[in-house]
Image (cartoon, rainbow, N blue to C red):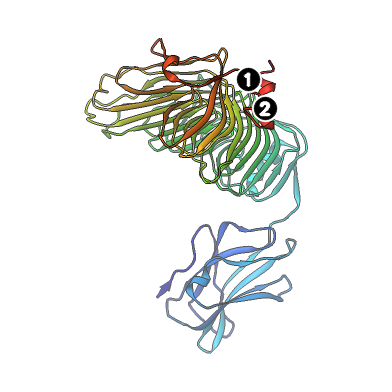
């Protein structure tokens, strides 16, 4: 009989020891999770294998220090107790051993053993490109950057293609001239951040492909300049500058392609990021979900995005290849800051953000198959977010938006729904977003589509749920052009020429910096 207990996350080893006086075929296998070893302890689970049913009584897990003295123990009363066993309050400069003792007949045997050391709290100094790349060998370490590093002629792969759960303090220094030669599942200087913290850093001249030679990816991908994937609410990114950088990649994934200057997908906390002279570009050649933003492609439930200053340009092009999976649909979400905002759960999750970069959606070619008899193609484009299911407060958009689509020869049997808005392509929240401005001076919203498109168009929110409300207005000149005809008279967006009482202090100062007059 085999009793399988615990959660298998990362198998770090099985150790089988026979008691000196008692032989047994029973074994204990240790499973330690991704973040199971910390600076003061360990959390683990155990799988017991007892093929000859020799265990007759108590099973005890004991912890010993380096001298062999017992520190503490746990007696297991039920199968549930084998999962997430935790020992904490340990010294991080010592080595410990865990032994699993089982009653075999009238005797006791050690059936499993695991030696470990808590993570060091020492700060590792990073001074060279080689030291930065070597962080892959300790993805839970604590690091501080001591000087600028130029990666010119250095072959770069993120140290954290697997998750980073440590700390990295950039000290205000700069990592420059980083060139990616390929896209993987989590592309970015910091790749994949789980529970890690990265702060006080400048990224200058990071290139993910070029417009002439975009990097190709055939499977699901999350691509960012800073990080591809920030995966949990315990991750934190703060005080980052991204400048003179670009993403140019081509996706043929039938699942998803997420892209943003900060992250392709964010589930953590992002605070105080400046994005300058940067482009986020994606060419899609499939029917996978697309979520592209100047800052973040996908903002997930529980995440935060605050104090973001961006002039990132966003460029999306669709050149889908004909496919044999008839009647598949499209979901394309493109935003000046966020592709898809699903940061629900707290009303202040997204606030104090702005973008002045242009959003361009061009050559939307769905390549509908001639045998396609149905399907739904949805495209939502907005200055702040392509689509939002959550509240955004204290924000403005001051760039131009353009979208171009012509009917395919075989589009007759599909439904096409487009939403384009100066702030949101689609607004789905049933709560109120407030203190929002669409800035209109030389900025334009220009849409060219075929007559078969169900078009939702506004200087504020293109498509909007009946329950949601927007405290939003156009500041300055109006502009809304559909197939060469002005639609501002039909829009009914409120227009203001005084922003004195629109924003709180942070955003008021930011707005005055961008528009001093």
Number of numbered callouts drawn: 2
| Image position, residue 485 (x, y; %) | 40, 10
In this rendering, the answer to whether 210 lies above or below 485 is below
Q: Which mark is residue 498?
A: 1
Which is nearer the eye, 55 or 501? Answer: 501
Q: Which mark is residue 508?
A: 2
**Which residue is the extreme one toward the top?**
484
Is residue 191 in sight in this rendering? no
**Callout 2 secondary element:** helix
Q: Residues within 10 Å of mark 2 (few under 14, many from 20)?
A: some
**Callout 1 secondary element:** loop
Q: Nearer the viewer, mark 2 or mark 1?
A: 1
Which is nearer the eye, 344 or 450? Answer: 344
Label 2 and label 1: CA atoms lie apart by: 12 Å
The first of marks 2 and 1 along the sequence is 1
Identified at 53% across, 83% down, the residue is: 103
**Which residue is the extreme one toward the bottom?**
106
In this rendering, the answer to whether 487 lies above or below 303 is above
Q: Residues within 10 Å of mark 1 (few under 14, many from 20)?
A: few
Splitting the image into 4 quarters, where does residue 454 fall? top left
Task: Answer left or right for 326 relative to 157.
Answer: left
């Amino acid at each position: 009989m085999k009793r399988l207990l615990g959660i298998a996350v990362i198998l770090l080893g099985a150790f089988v020891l026979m008691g000196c006086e008692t032989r047994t075929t029973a074994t204990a296998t240790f499973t330690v999770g991704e973040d199971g070893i910390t600076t003061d302890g360990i959390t683990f689970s155990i799988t017991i294998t007892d093929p000859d049913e020799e265990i007759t009584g108590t099973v005890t897990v004991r912890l010993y220090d380096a001298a062999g003295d017992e520190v503490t123990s746990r007696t297991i009363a039920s199968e549930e107790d084998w999962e997430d066993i935790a020992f904490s309050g340990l010294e991080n400069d010592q080595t410990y051993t865990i032994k699993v003792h089982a009653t075999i007949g009238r005797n006791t045997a050690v059936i499993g053993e695991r030696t470990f050391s808590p993570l060091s709290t020492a700060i590792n100094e990073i001074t060279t490109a080689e030291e930065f790349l070597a962080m892959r060998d300790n993805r839970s370490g604590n690091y501080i950057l001591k000087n600028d590093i130029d990666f010119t002629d250095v072959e770069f792969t993120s140290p954290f293609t697997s998750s980073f759960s440590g700390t990295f303090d950039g000290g205000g220094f700069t990592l420059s001239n980083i060139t990616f030669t390929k896209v993987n599942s989590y592309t970015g200087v910091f790749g994949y951040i789980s529970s890690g913290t990265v702060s006080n850093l400048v990224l200058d001249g990071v290139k993910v492909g070029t417009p002439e030679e975009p990097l190709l990816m055939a499977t699901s991908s999350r691509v960012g300049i800073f990080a591809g994937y920030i995966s949990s609410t315990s991750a934190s990114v703060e005080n980052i500058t991204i400048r003179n950088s670009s993403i140019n990649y081509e996706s043929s994934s039938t699942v998803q392609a997420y892209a943003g200057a900060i992250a392709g997908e964010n589930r953590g906390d992002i605070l105080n990021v400046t994005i300058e002279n940067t482009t986020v570009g994606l060419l899609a050649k499939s029917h996978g979900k697309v979520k592209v933003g100047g800052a973040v492609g996908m903002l997930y439930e529980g995440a935060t995005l605050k104090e973001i200053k961006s002039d990132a340009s966003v460029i999306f092009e669709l050149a889908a290849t004909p496919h044999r999976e008839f009647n598949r649909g499209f979901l394309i979400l493109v935003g000046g800051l966020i592709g898809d905002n699903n940061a629900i759960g707290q009303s202040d999750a997204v606030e104090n953000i702005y973008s002045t970069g242009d959003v361009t959606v061009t050559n939307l070619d769905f390549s509908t198959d001639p045998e396609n008899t149905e399907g739904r193609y949805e495209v939502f484009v907005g200055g702040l977010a392509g689509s939002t299911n959550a509240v955004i407060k204290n924000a403005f958009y001051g760039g131009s938006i353009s979208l171009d689509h012509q009917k395919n020869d075989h589009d007759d049997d599909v439904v096409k729904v487009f939403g384009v808005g100066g702030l949101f392509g689609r607004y789905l929240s049933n709560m109120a977003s407030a203190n929002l401005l669409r800035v209109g001076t030389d900025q334009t919203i220009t849409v060219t589509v075929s007559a078969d498109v169900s078009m939702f168009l506004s200087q504020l929110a293109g498509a909007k749920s009946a329950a949601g409300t927007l405290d939003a207005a156009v500041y300055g000149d109006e502009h809304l052009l559909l197939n060469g005809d002005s639609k501002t008279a039909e829009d009914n967006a409120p227009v203001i020429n005084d922003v004195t009482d629109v924003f709180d202090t942070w955003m008021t100062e930011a707005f005055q910096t961008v528009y001093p007059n």
